[in-house]
Image (tube, rainbow, N blue to C red):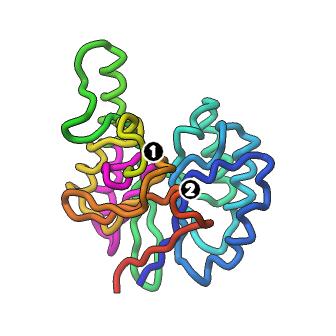
Amino acid sequence: MIRVAAVGDVHLGEDARGLLRPALEHLADLADVLLLAGDLTRHGTLEEAGVVADEFGDLDRPVVAVLGNHDYHGDRQDDITKLLEDRGIRMLEGTSARVEVGGECLGIAGVKGFGGGFAGKCASAFGEREMKDFVEHTIERSDALRRAMLELDDVDHRIALTHYSPIPETLRGEPPEIYPFLGAYQLGEVIDECGADLAVHGHAHFGCEQGVTPGGVRVRNVAQPVIRSAYATYGLGS
């Protein structure tokens, strides 16, 4: 069985240095890979990203991550990505990674995603240019996830890693009025179309942990305010 650890929305600032590292020192005893589901920083500064690197970098298990909306706030997302990659964290954005575990290959496709809402209560690419831009960005990021997942046609297990949610079920507990800003059905459609053993996301601090796509893929909201721990663990395979 492949053991997957995951957490999102840690929102580390410069005053949080050393907060999570002690809980990660024995990660190898509990997990084969660690996934980070975005919102690693508070305001998307390089100083905050340095704290993230100190907490999650140079671990004895592979770490694979996507950024979240907070990490984009300072318009330094490319610099943050490079800083984290320089510390051994594999960053995904419409790309994929492979991890070898006990003779099996785990494939991880990652993208930040975006909002837009869910079937019956969603935005559409109609009207003002600003609304079209919003929805078109959602579609573009969903297409990027599709391309990344299709790259993983030869793996034993496949995970979709996003920041925004692919389903509404893991948003239960959030005000319904803000669902369109927490996720998009297009992400869920791609996951069902391409197939996955697990989908992991964050972003919804007041949501719930467990859900499932219409096609039956397990979805887990690993926002730290939801899982209330340094990370949650999930098993793939027998």
Question: Of the numbered discs in the image, which one, if any, rests on residue 225?
Answer: 2
Q: Residue at x 46, y 48 (%)?
A: 204
Q: Residue 120: where, in percent of width, then height?
A: 19, 37
Q: Quadrant of residue 47?
A: top right
Q: Is residue 214 left or right of residue 220?
A: left
Q: Quadrant of the N terminus?
A: bottom left
Amino acid identity at mark 1: Lys
Crowdedness near tag 2: few (<14), some (14–19) or many (≥20) residues, C-alpha within 10 Å? some
Q: Quadrant of residue 113?
A: top left
Q: Secondary structure at mark 1?
A: loop
Q: Residue 125: where, in percent of width, then height?
A: 25, 24
Camera-nearest label, 1 or 2: 2
Front in this rendered view, residue 157 or 98: 157
Q: Residue at x 22, y 64 (%)?
A: 216
Q: Residue 98: where, in percent of width, then height?
A: 44, 66
- Dot 1 or dot 2: first in sequence order is 1
Q: Is residue 163 left or right of residue 59?
A: left
The magenta stretch is 144-170
Question: Of the numbered discs in the image, which one, if any, rests on residue 112?
Answer: 1
Q: CA distance from mark 1 to mark 2?
A: 19 Å
Question: Of the numbered discs in the image, which one, if any, rests on residue 183?
Answer: none
Crowdedness near tag 1: few (<14), some (14–19) or many (≥20) residues, C-alpha within 10 Å? many
Asked if residue 151 lies in the magenta stretch, the reply is yes
Q: Residue 68: where, in percent of width, then height?
A: 52, 43
Q: Is residue 190 left or right of residue 161?
A: left
Q: Residue at x 52, y 65 (%)?
A: 6
Location of residue 124 with respect to 107 vertically, above or below: above
